[in-house]
Image (cartoon, rainbow, N blue to C red):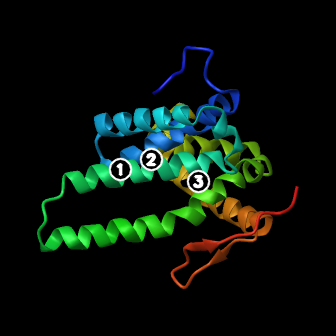
């Protein structure tokens, strides 16, 4: 992972990066399936954030901004590697569909920490380990002396409870395909 060793990093970037780096890396890895490319894109995302300097602190949703930059870098990389064939056009349409789909979900990042705080420690632990940090359910089961079916059940129940908390806390609305279309975070 990218680590910052010098003190010139803006504190708000340092905090946001610390909270986002692992999730961002695993998202990139899931999207591209290539560890080296995911790491390169992660580094480039960090460099773009560094270039913002103190302006980064004025970005309203910094984590969503990082995901947008990473998504755009990934899209650019995928476009560079696509040969223009009839299938390439459908790939571009798919990338555009993904780009249109992500912003509401990216924006939910501001609700997630509060929602996780309202969960039981057991639910929060399995969600953080398997969904946010990318640990396999098999590894989670082994490290917590549980069976794989038990972990699958726990994570399924925890996800349902998290969904309810997010629906209530962020007033999420779903489209006809049950995907997040919009939300209205509660006032602090």
Does dot 3 land on a helix, a strand or a loop? helix
Taking 111 as reference, is 27 left or right? left
The residue most toward the right is: 188
Q: Which residue position holds label 3?
A: 155
Task: Tell me if label 2 and label 1 are in contact, CB under 8 Å.
Answer: yes
Say above or below: 160 vs 110.
Answer: below
State the residue position of label 1.
74
Q: Which mark is residue 70?
A: 2
Asked whether 161 or 20 is in front, the reply is: 20
Q: CA distance from mark 3 to mark 1?
A: 29 Å
Q: Does 119 sit left or right of 71 as displayed?
A: right
Answer with left or right where residue 85 lies relative to residue 40.
Answer: left
**Number of numbered callouts drawn:** 3
Say what secondary structure mark 2 lies in.
helix
Q: CA distance from mark 2 to mark 1?
A: 6 Å
Residue at position x 48%, y 45% from top?
A: 137
């Amino acid at each position: 992972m990218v680590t910052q060793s010098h003190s010139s990093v803006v504190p708000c970037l340092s905090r946001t990066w610390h909270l986002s780096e692992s999730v961002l890396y695993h998202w990139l890895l899931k999207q591209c399936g290539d560890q080296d490319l995911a790491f390169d894109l992660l580094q480039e995302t960090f460099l773009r954030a560094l270039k913002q300097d103190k302006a980064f602190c004025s970005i309203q949703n910094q984590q969503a901004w990082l995901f947008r930059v990473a998504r755009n870098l990934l899209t650019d990389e995928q476009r560079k590697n696509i040969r223009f064939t009839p299938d390439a056009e459908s790939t571009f349409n798919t990338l555009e569909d993904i780009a249109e789909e992500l912003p509401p979900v990216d924006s939910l990042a501001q609700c997630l920490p509060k929602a996780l705080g309202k969960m039981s420690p057991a639910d929060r632990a399995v969600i953080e380990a398997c969904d946010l940090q990318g640990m396999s359910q098999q590894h989670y089961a082994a490290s917590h002396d549980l069976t794989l079916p038990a972990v699958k059940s726990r994570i399924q129940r925890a996800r349902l409870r998290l969904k309810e908390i997010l629906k209530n806390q962020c007033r999420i609305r779903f489209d006809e395909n049950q995907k997040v279309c919009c939300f209205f975070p509660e006032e602090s």
